[in-house]
Amino acid sequence: MSTASDRKHYSMIIDGKSVEAQSGLTFETFNPSKNEVLATVARAGKADVDAAVAAARGALNNAWKKTSAVKRTRLLMKYAELIQKNIDELARLETMNCGKPVWASKGELTQGIEDFEYYAGAITKLTGETLVMPNNLFAYTTREPVGVCGQIVPWNYPVMMAAWKLAPALAAGCTVVLKPASATPLTALCLAELALEAGIPAGVVNVITGPGAEIGAYMAEHPGIDKIAFTGETETGKAIMRAAAGTMKRVTLELGGKSPNLVFEDADLAAAVNGSVFAVFYSSGQSCEARTRVYVHEKVYDAFVADFIAKTQKLVVGDPLHEKTQIGALISDAHLRKVHGYVESGVAEGARLECGGKKVETGDLAKGNFYAPAVLTGVNQKMKCVREEVFGPVVTISPFKTESEALELANDTEYGLAGTVWSTNGARAIRASAGIKAGLITVNQPFTGFPGVPFGGFKQSGFGRELALETLKLYTEQKSVVQWVGEKPLNPFGL
Ligand code: NAD
């Protein structure tokens, strides 16, 4: 990989080659902490999608299907090693393109590397079954790769979402056409280059760049694509599901969230504050699983809110390339305005803005999309800021009286991605975890993404799981074989 963060133009990777769009068109991608152009990128159209799908189909039939699981393990381990070798450069590029602190980019890359290692190890353990059958019949199941997979990822965790998708697909023997978000296409393109350097055959990993409404939508209906794995907004997920129905594609969807964070009166309050601040403001709140709705038992509410505000005000908002920065830039000025709109609407509906809630205008930061983390209290369940996904550094905090009320408030949402429980009462922690309708609950800590721990939503947060052993199965088709093993041939019609 040449020094990625110095490059001024990025081409697509199709069939192992660096290519421009057939139309010759390009688009600009930005550094959100300065609002300066970072690079130009090839802008794919439908013809480029067709070329990428043809390359993926060719590689599936001619190379990847013939590569044994053990060989795929070795190639994926090599791939992980190469990402590790380039981690500093990739983290810098990720930070320059999406605005998150460089330590966070590095952490997400580290997790991406672990995903490749996890699935590299797991694929040789995926076996079929022999089944209990009537006499003289023998039956077994096998698993085959689904085929060509279209993978569409968002801008908030560009490289990590790409890794979550690529690792199980490649391990399972699928080939891929990956489309990153137009705001953050650069690290995905680098991943495609590294796949080739690792020895993964040309055409197995194709990365195309361009507008989602055009080429993403075309991928969802494309007859040459067997499965779509999507991460992004719930509304986009619904459109993809509808488009995929035409060819009965396999679909997995990781969508939006509005995750609750319950702080009980028996919680370790200092830990709950520190963990809750992280759980909502990591990645400047641009996180599907951000625990944005904090509900606190009335007995500890005042103490919790005071400490939460004090800690929020201490967060270091700044240049994401500085190691000490905790809150980087939002992805764009338009997104910052949208986030601010939620704070304004909350205040207009009667919420109290306790701190933050405005664009940072000091010194060099004024050029970028920096937003001071906002804490809203005095909210109710009807407010837009409580109901809708803000996707920025904005939290709402409100009190509850009883455990059952806490669960009712937690579940009063169309989403169901994640949730957190803070309690030192073990039985209550288990009860509350069971009571929250969401795919992933954390107890007394805010972290979620671990290879092997299924990640995905209930309700309108999507379906299918990533990071899990089960994910491998979602990249395969199960086949049943039923065979006659009797000594005499069968003659069912007695002919
Ligand atoms: P988005 O839905 O706007 O875009 C996601 C991707 O889909 C991009 O690559 C985009 O170009 C493409 N796209 C847009 N319109 C399309 C269409 N009609 N057909 C096909 N593809 C299309 O989402 P975003 O703004 O990039 O990302 C933020 C969203 O992602 C939030 O809602 C967040 O909660 C969600 N998210 C979910 C998870 C999860 O694991 N559940 C993880 C990260 C982000």
Image (tube, rainbow, N blue to C red):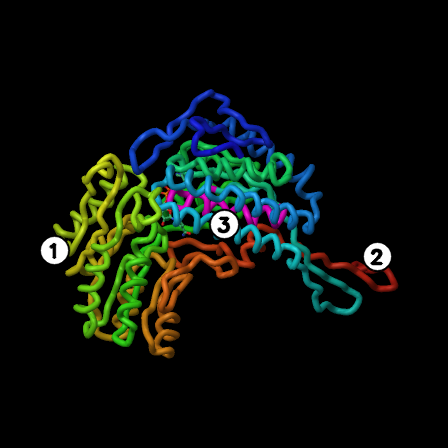
Give the amino acid at mark 1.
Answer: Gly
Membership of 247 in magenta stretch: no
| Front residue of this view, candidates 490 and 88 | 88
C-alpha separation, residue under disc 2 versus residue under disc 3: 60 Å
Residue 240 location (% of width, % of height): 44, 43
Q: Which residue is mark 1?
A: 350
Q: Which residue is mark 2?
A: 495
Give the amino acid at mark 2.
Answer: Leu
Q: Which residue is mark 3?
A: 112
Membership of 157 in magenta stretch: yes
Which residue extends farthest top? 24
In the rendered image of this protein, does residue 493 appear above or below residue 330? below
| Front residue of this view, candidates 89 and 36 | 89
The span shown in magenta is: 152-173
Which residue extends farthest right? 488
For the residue with label 2, is its CB less than 8 Å from the closest atom of ligand 1?
A: no
In the rendered image of this protein, does residue 271 appear above or below residue 60? below
Residue 245 in sight here: no
Q: Residues within 10 Å of mark 1 (few under 14, many from 20)?
A: some
Q: Quadrant of residue 484?
A: bottom right
| Front residue of this view, candidates 255 and 344 | 344
Q: Quadrant of residue 214?
A: top left
Q: Secondary structure at mark 2?
A: loop
